[in-house]
Amino acid sequence: MSVFTDVAATRTPAASLSARLNSYDWQQTAHELATRGASILGGLLSEQECAALVSLYDEAELYRSKVIMARHGFGQGEYQYFRYPLPHLVSELRTQAYPYLAPVANQWNAAMNQDIRYPEAHEDFIARCHSAGQTRPTPLILKYQADDYNCLHQDLYGEHVFPLQLAVLLSKPGEDFSGGEFILTEQRPRMQSRAEVIPLRQGDAVIFAVHHRPAQGVRGVYRVTMRHGVSRVRSGKRYALGMIFHDAT
Ligand SMILES: O=C(O)CCC(=O)C(=O)O
Ligand SMILES: [Fe+2]
């Protein structure tokens, strides 16, 4: 094996997606989500998988719609929502990551005194979305160039909301782009908002709260309102895969 193959091999998660997902410490992830509203899965996708997803951006027939963010006041940059059938990797990631997150979502709803519970399998949750008229797929790829940014927002697309989502950074910070940090804010009742920068490498995924999360206070559990966005890209191009688990109206 040449030196080059060797180096490439260490950077490429060799195991299948399901083995990779299974290798994370989900208890630790649940703890981080409960205490900070976010958790990183380091190296979820390989460099090759990231590059393959970036290359899909220009295949227009794969998407149901394209959004130019400045036209809607969402920021600057653009994104495209995939159409069904989703590309294999996108579909597998959504189906396979969901069962790890559903128990956390159910604990959160129990803690926040909300009746809604999420089924174990993503296809059952999607069936619920579809029967309520939320039939359009929400996985997307975002593309930012110099000076682009994504305003703080929440990805709510209808009555049915899965409370956690995932985003994967597809470009290499420091090489493909600079700036463009993933930002989370949390607003606690009667307190000022707090911001957190999530440092991501290419292929890292961040799991975060879509809308609300429970937080433990001295007088019991209270509800924190979360938003996410991306700071200004200083140079280069930044691509990300967004994975929202509910479909849209
Ligand atoms: O570009 C990013 O990292 C953020 C993407 C985003 O807003 C999302 O995945 O919902
Ligand atoms: Fe988003």
Image (cartoon, rainbow, N blue to C red):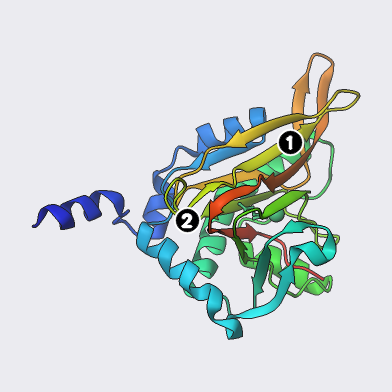
- Say which residue appears at 62% left-offset and 38% top-offset: 38
Residue occupying the far right of the picture: 190
**In front: mark 2 or mark 1?**
2
Please state which of residues 107 and 229 is positioned toward the viewer in this rendering.
229
Give the image location of residue 144, x and y in percent: 61, 59
Mark 2 or 1 closer to N-term?
2
Left or right of residue 130: residue 171: left
Q: The disc labelled 1 sits on which kind of residue?
A: Thr
- Say which residue appears at 50% left-offset and 75% top-offset: 56
Q: In which quarter of the image is ligand 1?
A: bottom right
Cβ atoms under marks 2 and 1 closer than 8 Å: no
- Say which residue appears at 59% left-offset and 83% top-offset: 60
Left or right of residue 78: residue 169: left
The residue that mark 1 highlights is: 185
* Residue 171, numbered circle: 2
Please state which of residues 145 and 230 is positioned toward the viewer in this rendering.
145
